[in-house]
Image (tube, coloured by chain):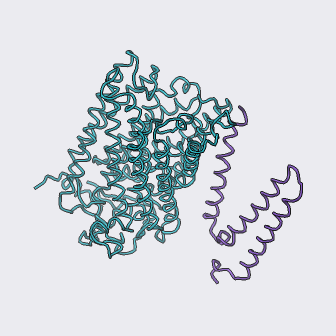
Chain colours: A purple, B cyan
Amino acid sequence: MDPHIQSYKKLGGVLGVLLVLTAVTVGVSRLDLGSLSLGVAMVIAGTKSALVLLFFMHLKYESWLIRGSFLMTIGVLALFIGFMFWDVGFR
Amino acid sequence: MIPRPWAVSTERNRAIPMGETMSNAVTSFYDTPFPARFRGVWSWLFTLDHKRIALLYLGAATFWFIIAVVLGFLVRMELMTPGRTIMGAETYNAAFTLHGVIMIFLFVIPAMPAIFGNFLLPIQIGTDDVFFPKLNLLSWYLYMLGGALAIVSLFADGPPDTGWTFYVPFSVSTQTNVGLTLTAAFILGLSSMLTGLNFITTVHRMRVPGMGWLQIPLFTWSLYATAWVQLLATPVLSITLLLVVFERVFGTGLFDPARGGDPVLYQHLFWMYSHPAVYIMILPGMGVISEIIPVFSRKSIFGYKAIVGSSIGIATAGSLVWAHHMFTSGMSDVAVFVFSFLTFIVAVPSAIKVFSWVSTMYKGSILMTPPLFFALCFIYLFSVGGLTGLVLGAAGPNIQVHDTHFVVAHFHFVMFGGTGFSFFAGLHFWWPKMFGRMYHFKRAYLSAILIVTGFMLHYVPMFILGLQGMPRRYYDYLEQFAPGNFFAGLGALIMVPGLFLMVINLMVSLKQPVDAPADPWGGTTLEWSVPSPPPLHNFIERPRPGKYPYDFSRVRTP
């Protein structure tokens, strides 16, 4: 079978995990984690978007070139924001 | 009969193997509308053919280029003598703003990828179109919409007077029509992004089987590197321009220190796009030169892999140097140090390219033609522009020459001497491919000589004026700056007629019969293996790319 065509079972499973993680997001938001709350929320959100990208957007089945291209865009965003701190952080 | 010097000078230099097997009797894309149901002007306005879209861009970009040249010329005439010469101060502010905005957003950024890229990228990689033909047409419409809005902004509430950088707080407080101009720039950015996206996908997905990454011609490589910058940097500008519109309409205070905002933040965001944008402007030009030099040296390009690597290097390093525009803005000293250092790194890949072009010519069998002449001018002018960029990138001298005419001269050496000349070189190089007609060589040389002579007289005095301390954008100046400004004006009087002569010479060639050979120069990349002008689907049979795109061993030399 073409690896780009995934079974309903697998897609349904991913959907299930996403729904569970959404519930976790809501649940965690009610706990008082102090300074950790932002980090925890970001990790859950990151995991969810990774699942969407990997399975629903087929990134898992792409070549290293496409995957690398995607990761590079994230890296560029991080650099753009990060490099501003050479100014903001030392003013 | 119209004299055709090329028929004598290039006939004997034609490449034999591939071009000869295909005749020009094939129906060209001009006679094959796509989609086929449209006729006449509709076959252009609704076309999905990458070659027609390229020509649509060529027409529109030429229009904008001429407008911007005239505006720039008027600015220079105003400055030719002290005091009021031909226009008032407010008109002057609007004229230099529009010169910059039109030249940059409507000509220099889109010209090379949208015209040559659209026309040649699919052919160079051996395919029949770009990956998203409809998106390609949409990009053109967005480009036209952006251009139309820029015109409208002229006539409603007065033209913008901020300069092309739209710096806050002035761009937020000025009463002129900045909002509309920003919207225009926003839409033009979207057009640019879509073109970039299209090229990346096309290069990834549509290369003819057998063409690996290191068999891609260097012009396509440069477009590929450019496309990434277009795709990743342009959104930053779009967001920034929207923030200024928000600031003007809702007074959000993002850039207002009184409300916790930061005006320097605007400069960061603006240059985060606009510095990479100068690489969007220059990289395809470098790609054009990398095609022209080997063809007319009859010699394989020196350092193919180094040129590919330097394209990627420029795209990467060039995206990380934006704050060197801000050394006097009050940002931290650490940032000044870091960005100054990074700026010097960009010089390395640029120098690799210049070195490789010169080395390609060394011991080559050089054939002088108008494209090569423009390309040689490019190498010289770009080198001057690049090296003076280091003066500006060094944190110390920058303080002295910041916002002076030195910056104006540097910028024009790179953007006009670099991108402009490579555009002219590419236009003369691929003109027979695009239109199937050759132009008059002597007039082409004459125009090139006028342009480059005028150019030197125009911009070299500006370097001196800048070092003497004359600020940019000023309407009037002290008596001691008068000679320099006079000479610069004189240069414009030589350069502008040269530009018009070049355009007219190319236009006149369109009256001739379509008779240019498939490969008038002896090129080796795939576009020279198809008829001039190419048929609708570019290739009659599936092309077989060579192991190396610049193998001249089968090209006959005189």
Which residue is pictured at 35% across the width and 32% down the height?
B75
Q: Please indicate whether residue B558 sits to the left or right of residue A29 in the image.
A: left
Residue that protrudes farthest toward the top in the picture? B479
Return the residue nearer the eye: A8 or B366. Answer: A8
Residue B358 visible within the image: no
Which of the 4 quarters of the picture holds residue A33? bottom right
Which residue is pictured at 29% across the width and 36% down the height?
B495
Quarter of the C terminus of chain B within the rendering: bottom left
Residue B9: where, in percent of width, then height? 21, 52
Residue A62 visible within the image: yes
Return the residue nearer the eye: B418 or B240. Answer: B240
Residue B521: where, in percent of width, then height? 29, 56
Quarter of the N terminus of chain B within the rendering: bottom left
Compared to residue B175, the image places residue A77 above or below, namely below
Residue B52: where, in percent of width, then height? 34, 63
Which of the 4 quarters of the picture holds residue B409? top left
Which of the 4 quarters of the picture holds residue B487? top left
